[in-house]
Amino acid sequence: MSRARALHDQAAALLRLRAVRLAAAARALAAARDATARAGAAARAAGAAAEAAQEAQVAAHAALVADPAEAERRLAVLDRALFRRSVAARDAEAAEDAEARAAAAEAQQRRAAIVARARHDALAERTAGLRRARRARADTREQQDREMIRRFR
């Protein structure tokens, strides 16, 4: 096997490997995008729950002010509403943090996919160059052979 053929085979194998890595990077990017979308939906749901808890707390406070005779029961309702609001706010913050982490992971996967594509393209160009060079050498050899045959006739 000639050196050129060995180089070509090696470049072709590397090109196939890069194609596999590029496909893996694309799959990872799609998974990261899905995770970001899920985290965004969870953050929106947690935000809605926090808003509902805030409204319930405001309503409980208004009811306490409106009916001082049932102050003890109304204070318990208000306390429960405050607790629910704080839990909902904590959940909303956690969901926002998860969304931010998912967005960062998606950005990292996007960068990895871009790098993989660039490496794949560079390797494909190198392989194409090796093919062109091999074909040019083969054409030159054929031309020389034809010239030698023509001379010795």
Image (cartoon, rainbow, N blue to C red):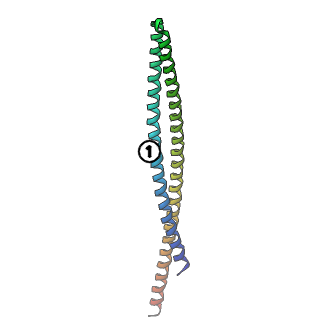
Q: Is residue 76 above or below residue 139?
A: above
Residue 94, given in percent of the width and then of the height, sits at: 53, 34
Residue 85, given in percent of the width and then of the height, sits at: 50, 23
User: Which residue does the image show at 47% across and 5% down from the upper left?
Assistant: 69
Farthest residue in the bottom direction? Answer: 153
Dot 1: element: helix
Q: How many marks?
A: 1
Of residues 28 and 124, the one nearer the viewer is: 28
Q: Residues within 10 Å of mark 1 (few under 14, many from 20)?
A: some
Residue 37, given in percent of the width and then of the height, sits at: 44, 40
Q: Is residue 75 above or below residue 128?
A: above
User: Which residue does the image show at 52% across and 49% down from the upper left?
Assistant: 109
Q: Is residue 25 above or below residue 69?
A: below
Of residues 66 and 26, the one nearer the viewer is: 66
Farthest residue in the right direction? Answer: 3
User: Which residue does the image show at 43% across and 36% down from the upper left?
Assistant: 41
Which image quarter holds the C terminus?
Answer: bottom left
Residue 14, given in percent of the width and then of the height, sits at: 52, 66
Amino acid type, mark 1: Asp
What residue is pinned by disc 1? 34
Of residues 107 and 141, the one nearer the viewer is: 107
